[in-house]
Amino acid sequence: MRLDQAESWSQLQELLFGEMWSPSLGRFRSDEVFRGEGRASNELTTSLQRLGGPYPELERHLLRNFRKYAHRDAVQRESTWHWLALAKHHGLPTRLLDWSHSPYVALHFATENPAVLDEDGIVWAVDYVRAATHLPAALRSVLDEEGSNTFTAEMIDRAATTLSALDALADQSEEFIVFYEPPSLDERITNQFAAFSFMSNARARADEWLGVHPDLLRRVVIPAGLKREVRDKLDQANVTERVLFPGLDGIARWLARHYSSPAPGS
């Protein structure tokens, strides 16, 4: 499992963008998705797992009741995977993890919290194309038929229409991870260049699965001493809450962080 530490802004760019050349395409197109954490020690646990208690049994009840109480036109299509994306988007505990195709969006989430600017942060980068080679045949065949490297909600639905049907696929193979691009529910999904992942059952953890497949993962540590520079340069590049969370809530979050940050050199 590769672990690098950036010592400067320029080295950070090299570490994040250095794996993007695609010989087959002749373009700089990455096969990775990125996730930023404010603390380098953070694990990749889902919001569902952080509930504690009998969370695997609670998963279907959470989603069923969210669907029951949500507006009937909340999703464009009646699909578990559309509902799951919408529920995650609005804060319901789910087995989904957020990723982005943008290294800068990941850097934003690694540096957004002023309370942990004095702690090392980290960006996780996972090769989702190679991760797909570990999928069971029912899912892999859908990707092959479409000539795609990631799923849409509709594509997952062709192999498994429910969470229990998806879980059953793991009985035929080892645990697996699925990466999919959620429907564009609103500008937030679009502006964050969002991707989701989920494991083959609610108990499984992405970090533990990646530990068994270390060739798919690399991590880049952002030392505490570099985080303020990274944060300021992201702000100058307009990678802020105002853009990533369009609307009044995002503006409020952006201003609260901007004015709570200690002055440079303090």
Image (tube, rainbow, N blue to C red):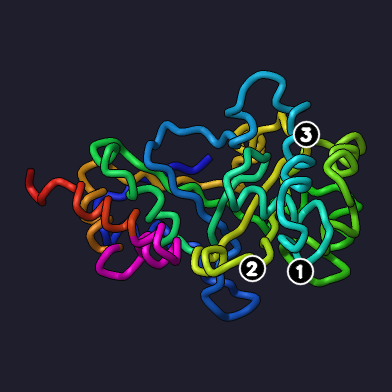
> In the image, residue 42 lies at what x, y percent?
45, 33
Callout 2: helix, strand or loop? Answer: loop
Residue type at tag 1: Ser
Kindly tell me whether residue 14 is visible in this rendering: no
Which residue is tagged 1?
148
Question: How far apart are the two marked residues, 1 and 3, measured between alpha carbons?
Answer: 32 Å
Question: How far apart are the two marked residues, 1 and 2, measured between alpha carbons?
Answer: 18 Å
Q: Which residue is drawn at 77% across and 58% down?
A: 72
Which residue is tagged 2?
184
> In the image, residue 136 lies at what x, y percent?
86, 47
Q: Quadrant of residue 166?
A: top right
> In the image, residue 242 lies at what x, y percent?
37, 64
Looking at the rendered structure, the number of numbered marks drawn on it comes to: 3
Against 56, residue 234 (above or below) is below
Q: Quadrant of residue 71?
A: bottom right
Residue type at tag 3: His
Q: Which of marks 1 and 3 is in front?
A: 3
Q: Nearer the viewer, mark 1 or mark 2?
A: 2
Mark toward the start of the polypeptide (3 vs 2): 3
Is 243 one of the magenta-colored residues? yes
Which residue is tagged 3?
61
